[in-house]
Amino acid sequence: MKIKIEETETRGRAVVATERLEPGLSGLEVLTERALMVFPTRGSNDGPVPHFLAPNPQLFTDWCNYLQQPKEIQERILNLYTDMECPHANALRDYLHNYRENQYDEEEKMEQYDEETKEQILEDPIESDAVRYIFDHIEEFVQFVMVIRFNSVELQPPAEDGTGPGTNFGHGLFEVACKMNHSCRPNCVWFTTPDGKCKEIRAISTIEEGEELTVDYVGNVLDATPQRREDLLNTKGFVCECDRCAANHDDTRRFKCITHADSKCNGFHFLYQPTYSSKPSLLECSCCGAKADQDYTYKVMKEEIALVGEINEVDEALDTSSIIEFQDRIEGLEPPHEYHSLADKCYQLKGELYSFLGDYRRAAEAYAKCIDCRIAILGNDYYSQATAFACERLGDALNHIDVDEAEVAYKRTVRVLELMRGAAHSDPYVKCAMKKLLTVQNRRIHSSNYPKESCVKGMADTGIARPPATDFPCRLCGNPSMIPSSSRDALSYCCEFHKRMHRAAVRGGCVCIEEEKTWD
């Protein structure tokens, strides 16, 4: 195997590489693991939930499903979490012991009432086998809850058409994948296979032998450091100490130089605030070295809080209202700095607004700024699904004003998604992006009547997923070619799959992606 599980001094069990893992340009599948157990989402017919578990009815459903498993599976599940003296386990254990004592006291007092009165007063009798088993085996139940809380992962693959999330299969437990630790700049990604039963783990950057494989647990790498840490503490029970969180500045929070209004200094102040309980402080300007005083710090913090509130209000309202109703508010969103993480959210909202209005040039500009912001924070060698989708939306906007630029954007989208998720014949997100790419390539070849505005020239040339310099780029995606289009041609394609898809689209006019397992 390419990986093994090791005990570490500070991070518990971890998954480490047994050899150098090099994703290259097309990504690297490290492992596809079938779930030890899948816990379906609770349905409306799943029966009553005991009062003491009412805040989390899904947990009781999970427990009932767990009890139906063979003993060997139950033991493997419990082995996923063994720190039974952690604060969370101790708190739950104390709660259950106290509840059991009080519950049995109440049952003894209830004997004096008739049956109808008992039903009205006693909301939570300990009567079902699943509930009785909890109080007869408190330690086992506590360990199971810790496993679910700290190790279960969502199982939701993309929709078949690749336009968004698909069926939610609930959550699952994995004996290897669940031992991967978190990083806010991970070297791997994981995603759910279409059947909802497996997790595929892929390397997105070079991993040296002996190096730990990491994933992002919560999907919020652009949130501020204290927010990421708080989310992880609340959901996973630990304070993140990855390189980004432990740095002496928050790379998601930049503010204009205090002298900008007078000197037009283009530098910025990083903020240092490792947790929300710590006092925020601005570092020296990156350009002129100016120091920000407390008044300026207070001013920008107040403005940041107000902007967060405004974005959240608009986001929530858009769930039930048309975006056009919030045009003025969205156009009025101004981030503290073009590379502050809130800029990403501002530009996304503006891109959606202008796309809705049919102002595709301004939509493209907004999405291009969104991508630039993400690259400035995370680096151009970090690949994320959110950045790929922003690049795809950039292509959607450019498709209305410059097909050449749209092709560039879609090529970048395909390169990122294929590296992260594999080939288009098996992944809906890649398939959706490739269909768009093949459509514009078909249009460019078979029609001379397509938009081409010089004012957006170079807009799609973002820093993300630039292909290596080559004399023979793949005609479909732009990566270096490995095979010719025929025995008489020069190198033209990076793989046989791209060759077949491109030739079918540009020669036969057929934009169709092969399904999985239709070719060897």
Image (cartoon, grey):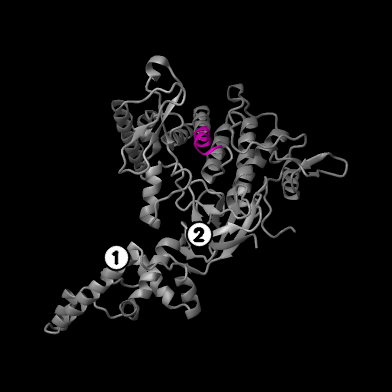
Q: Which residue appears at 87% of the width and 44% of the height?
A: 487
Three-letter amino acid code of the residue under disc 2: Thr
Range of the magenta residues? Answer: 371-379
- Depth check, front residue: 461 or 272: 272
Question: Predominant secondary structure in magenta?
Answer: helix
Of all residues shown, which one is farthest toward the front?
9
How packed is label 1: few (under 14 Cα within 10 Å), some, or many (20 or more)?
few
In the image, residue 165 sits, relative to residue 140, either above or below, namely above
> Does the magenta portion include 374?
yes
| Label 2 secondary element | loop
- Depth check, front residue: 343 or 82: 82
Nearest to N terminus: mark 1 or mark 2: 2
- The residue carrying mark 2 is 8
Residue 253 position in % (x across, y down): 41, 35
> Does the magenta portion include 442?
no
- The residue carrying mark 1 is 91
In the image, residue 239 sits, relative to residue 111, either above or below, namely above
